[in-house]
Image (cartoon, coloured by chain):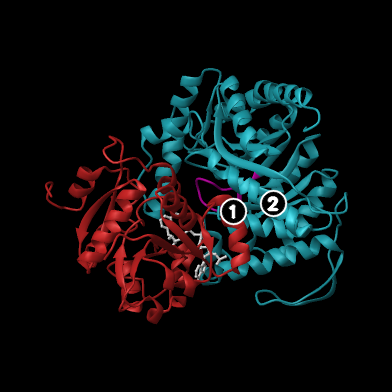
Amino acid sequence: MTEPKVIGILGAGRVGTAIARRALAAGYQVRVASSRPATEIALVLQFVAPGAIASDADEVIAGSDIIVLALPLSKYRNLRPDALAGKIVVDAMNYWAPTDGVLPEFEGAPSSTEVVADHLAGARLVRSFNHMGYHEIDGEARPKGDAERRAMAVAGDDPQARETVAGFIDRLGFDPVDAGRLSAASAFDIGTPVFGARLDRGQLKAALNLPAAA
Amino acid sequence: MELGVYSFGDVQRDPETGALGTTAEAQRNLLEAIQLADQVGLDYFGIGEHHTYEMPASAATVVLGAAAATTKNILLGSAVTVLSTDDPVRVYQQFATLDALSNGRAEITAGRGSSTESFPLFGHSLNDYDDLYAEKLDLLLRLNESDRITWEGRFRPSLDDALVVPRPVNGKLPIWLATGGNPNSTVRAAIAGLPVSYAIIGGDAERFAPLAQLYRQAVEQVKVPNADVRISVASPGFVGEDSNAAKELWWNHYHEAFRAIGEIRGFPAPQRAGYDRDANGKGALFVGSPEEIADRILALHGAMKHDRHFFQMDLGQLPQKDFLRSIELLGTKVKPLVDAALAEKADAQPETA
Ligand SMILES: NC(=O)c1ccc[n+]([C@@H]2O[C@H](COP(=O)([O-])OP(=O)(O)OC[C@H]3O[C@@H](n4cnc5c(N)ncnc54)[C@H](OP(=O)(O)O)[C@@H]3O)[C@@H](O)[C@H]2O)c1
């Protein structure tokens, strides 16, 4: 595909607005929806992500080149598979029973994103952003080549979608690390050594058992 | 500007023997800390409900009640009351009683709380997390409006013209809404006309400044009558005579506290580099000498114009003597510095102050 220009974000919470800010800083157009009316989201965005456009979920999905899921995982069933079919979708959501409640389909799943992938069959789903805290997404972005640049893992079954998302992450200020297929996402889920850790590209590759080169 | 302390009632470790204090001793230590905070002129002390061996502050109002009888000026509150797993009627009665005993010094800070031990303990399902909180906050706010209440909800039996007493000394209890940075919570506080309390526990503290602006703008737009428009900041912090010594000592306890939390929640123990970054400059950890902490409070105040800043000092089994010393320095050294600087600023620009 051509270079993505519009980033759509579902969820106007901590993670959603942090990604919105970074994406705006990197020169993307940004559209944000949550379960609240667009007027209320617009007020929020005016202060926390000035320049982002508040909209409803359908418009965000239809008008964006990459769609980031930053809503509470417990709400994932509200996502419409038909609307997201064929779209590049980034899953940043984690399963954390103490706030999501016990959701049986996630208990014992290899990783939460595979359950999301089953629900969104037809979307070009990519797993990323989930292993970094929201204040780090905000505060730790660095230009390419910076010695302190941190790495972010990218997994998904569609290689082209993975590459597009990797390009997006790179522009946001992190070194993307291609972890391969979606099943590899279990290696950077909550509870793994990668989760929340401050790792550069080499360290993240090592932690994911990927060859150092390439 | 008000300064204060909050605590989860940590048990303390004896620095010599390494032995952990008892959960009963922790309650008495907490009371001692509140009394000292009052004596050194601090404005606020909050107790955050927790139900673990390491943090046994499970019945905050009982400790605050004892403090009410043995302190003079300090405001006494929760930081936070885990409203979702409590009965708002009972919460209200307890804090109204505390208010009576302290002559109008009681406050409630309602929040979801970051730990969830109280859910299984009181027989609530985490699957109802959002709905429970919304419903109970609504009831708590209604209880603050009048002594008679008629109310109906999903999670508690209906109330039909029920009487809820005692009533607060000043008509109403201040009820703060605590948030960890989800902008919706800021908007919700503004729409309800409630003061908002930001928990800033890591990263760059000033990233909350846009939320403070959002709060004020939303207040402006909705124009709630009699709104209580105030902002407070709760953050980890520790004051010692010497900056480096304070940072060194406190690191061990900070590390221990967050290592233990991380173990439960699936993230790694904190690293020293991150601590050093956040414990300096614009970071969210207010650890250091009195002058340094005063400067950093003032710098954040420049960005947020908050009305109150209070600190969690006794993390990770900090010995009681270090906790007390830090409280003393906050009251006797930091507070006068902050007051003086703000007074000077107000004099310099009287028209905008
Ligand atoms: N906090 C972190 O550091 C972090 C890091 C990485 C990943 N994550 C994951 O990212 C997700 C979001 O976390 P967060 O901390 O940003 O939570 P948050 O601050 O509570 O924000 C969640 C946002 O989603 C919105 N939302 C709820 N239902 C929705 C729906 N059906 N459609 C669209 N939006 C909806 C919420 O607003 P309304 O309810 O008002 O619509 C809110 O704006 C979670 O799955 C979390 O596990 C968090």
- Across and down, in percent, residue A99 comes to 49, 63
Residue that mark 2 sits on:
B217
Chain of the residue under the numbered disc 1 shown in the image = A
- Across and down, in percent, residue B146 comes to 86, 64
Q: CA distance from mark 1 to mark 2?
A: 10 Å
Q: Which residues are magenta?
A: B47-58
Q: Residue at x 22, y 62 (%)?
A: A184
> Under 8 Å from ligand 1: the CB of mark 2?
no
Q: Considering only vertical position in the picture, is A108 above or below B12?
A: below
The chain coloured red in the image: A
The chain coloured cyan in the image: B
Image mark for residue A46? 1
Q: Residue at x 69, y 36 (%)?
A: B34
Q: Residue at x 88, y 53 (%)?
A: B171
- Across and down, in percent, residue B134 comes to 65, 67
Q: Amino acid at mark 2?
A: Gln
